[in-house]
Image: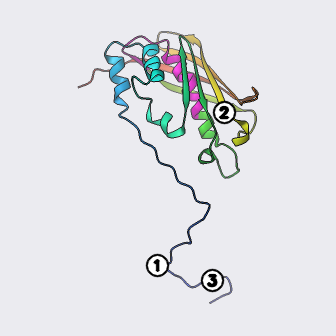
């Protein structure tokens, strides 16, 4: 055996890490939002029902800890307080988390202008990260606004600011608009 080799221990368990943390969460069936759209509730009505707790938030919002949904026609605000479980290996909030927050705000802004029975999906998301986000950034506020809505597509932007009001990230998003197929 060379100096760099170690004897194999197939049954050895790693020592538990005293600093290890855990997190659990629960969510409800995301089909309830889709049913609300098919039952005559327009996009803004759906978002207002989510904000008031009448219909559940989508599972991704629960998983990430998004809160404070503030919908208006063509505009949506949402918040996130950074947590350790949002971190990447560099000790900052992962860009995917920030992108998801921006995508949610932009997409929900588009959703707020849609009639009942109409939905959307993101075509693209162009994100600019402007400063690192950490626990010290405090609660993040993200505001999405519709820039242009057409018959088949919509264009929105989202701005993410930290607790000090500094712009941390910006995104633009194009969305495809489509009629929801009826449930079977």
Residue 106 painted magenta: yes
Q: Which mark is residue 139?
A: 2
Q: Which mark is residue 5?
A: 3
Q: CA distance from mark 3 to mark 1?
A: 18 Å
**Residue drawn 63% across the image and 36% down it:** 81
Confirm whether residue 158 shows in the render: yes
Which numbered disc, 1 or 2, marks the residue that appears first in the sequence?
Answer: 1
Query: Residue 135: x, y in percent?
Result: 69, 42
Q: Label 2 near label 1: C-beta < 8 Å?
A: no
From the viewer's perspective, is the residue at label 3 or at label 2 nearer? 2
**Which residue corresponds to mark 1?**
11
Mark 3 lies on a secondary structure that is: loop
Report the Cα–Cα distance between label 3 and label 2: 48 Å
Please provide the residue range marked out in magenta.
100-119
Count of marks overlaid on the render: 3
Residue 34 placement (x, y as % from top left): 36, 24
């Amino acid at each position: 055996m060379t100096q760099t080799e170690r004897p194999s221990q197939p049954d050895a368990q790693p020592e538990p890490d005293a600093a290890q943390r855990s997190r659990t969460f629960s969510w409800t069936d995301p089909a309830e939002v889709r049913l609300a759209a098919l039952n005559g509730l327009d996009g803004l009505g759906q978002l207002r029902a989510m904000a008031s707790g009448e219909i559940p938030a989508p599972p991704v919002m629960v998983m990430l800890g998004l809160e404070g949904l503030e919908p208006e026609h063509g505009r949506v605000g949402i918040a996130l307080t950074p947590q350790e479980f949002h971190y990447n290996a560099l000790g900052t909030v992962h860009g995917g988390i920030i992108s998801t927050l921006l995508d949610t705000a932009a997409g929900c802004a588009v959703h707020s202008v849609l009639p009942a029975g109409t939905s959307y999906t993101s075509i693209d998301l162009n994100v600019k990260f402007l400063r690192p986000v950490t626990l010290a950034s405090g609660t993040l506020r993200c505001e999405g606004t519709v820039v242009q809505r057409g018959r088949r597509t919509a264009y929105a932007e989202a701005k993410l600011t930290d607790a000090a009001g500094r712009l941390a990230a910006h995104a633009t998003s194009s969305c495809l608009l489509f009629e929801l197929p009826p449930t079977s």
